Amino acid sequence: MNKRIAVGIDIGGTNTVYGFIDEVGTVLEYQEIPTRGNQPIEDLIERLDSRIKLFFKNNSNLSLNGIGIGAPNGNHYSGKIQTPPNLSWGDVHIVSIFEEKFNCNTILTNDANAAALGEKKFGVAKSMNDFVVITLGTGLGSGIFSGGNLLYGHDGFAGELGHVSIDTNGRKCNCGSIGCLESYASATGIKKTVKTFLERNPKDEFLQSINSEKINGLLIDKAFDAGNKLAQQIYEYTGTQLGLGLAQAANLLSPEAFIFYGGFSNAGRRILDPAKISMEKYLINGNAHTINLLQSALPKGQAGILGAASLIFNS
Ligand SMILES: [Zn+2]
């Protein structure tokens, strides 16, 4: 009998990762492609469609068990991606599109929930029942496990920590609200921080070099390590704002850990150390020292596809 494989797809604001995964979590092959969120979603679906069909054509000993998808504003209950904030798609019933194309079981969740499922089944959260996975990418997403269960909320949209306001006089967020955590602690947020710093230091070469449409975290990491004061201040500010948001979640949920995943999580302690100090300032119950801020230890980019695939194997 053919070995049964799940396709895990992790749709992000900038890039989409898809992979072919067996029941024990072995990623047989995976690839990252641009999401092209300014194009209609059919563009992404066509590119995925041809790649998935080619894989199974080239591997006739494998058969498609199902497709698990993590996507921004992916609603587990409705099967729809609902007006994702950083993509121009409006409402898309992605589950029925995939079921029709591939004639297989398709399950959707939001991108941060997929990462949380990946960490729970295969990553650093294997033995944890209460934790929050934070995805630091174009935006800030969060997937919450409480008492061993992923929280969906009554409408499927629980876990929007990125849109908890930490400053009602603060920055305007893409969602329409004011002062959302995401407008400080994410690629979008850091871009805004760089612009603010640049207003104060218009001639600074380092700030000019990182002030681009697509902000490059590695450049900031490098400057930070070389002792660049502005790079250090950018991360200090980002981490401090992040910690303020983490404290709100921690006071509410009492998690064992926050686990960071995605592009900007590679900055690691450079952001997480100031975040921990700031979080502890706003925590109640003196449980500060028991909450760990950890980085995902799964191979780069794979928590999302592993979690999305686990939806299929657990269904
Ligand atoms: Zn918002």
Image (spheres, rainbow, N blue to C red):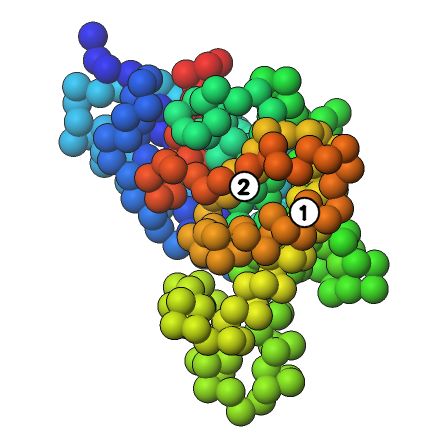
Element type where label 2 sits in the image: strand
Residue 87 appears in the picture as rendered: no
Q: Is residue 116 above or below residue 264?
A: above
Which residue is drawn at the image coordinates 30% and 44% (left, top)?
31
Q: What residue type is disc 1 on?
A: Met
Q: Amino acid at mark 2?
A: Leu
Report the disc number at residue 279.
1
Disc 2 beta carbon < 8 A from ligand 1?
A: no
**Residue 60 seen anywhere in this rendered image of the structure:** yes
x and y percentages locating residue 40 in the rendered image? 51, 52
Q: CA gap, disc 2 to disc 1?
A: 10 Å
Query: In this view of the protein, which residue sits in the foreground, 281 or 154?
Result: 281
Q: Quadrant of the N terminus?
A: top left
Q: Is residue 144 above or below residue 164?
A: above
Residue 177 vs residue 203, the one in the foreground: 203
Q: Which image quadrant for residue 173?
A: bottom right
Rate crowding at label 1 as few (under 14), some (14 to 19) or many (20 or more) other CA atoms within 10 Å. many
**Horizontally, is 136 left or right of 247 in the view?**
left
Q: In the rendering, which numbered label is found on residue 293? A: 2
For the image, the number of numbered tags is 2
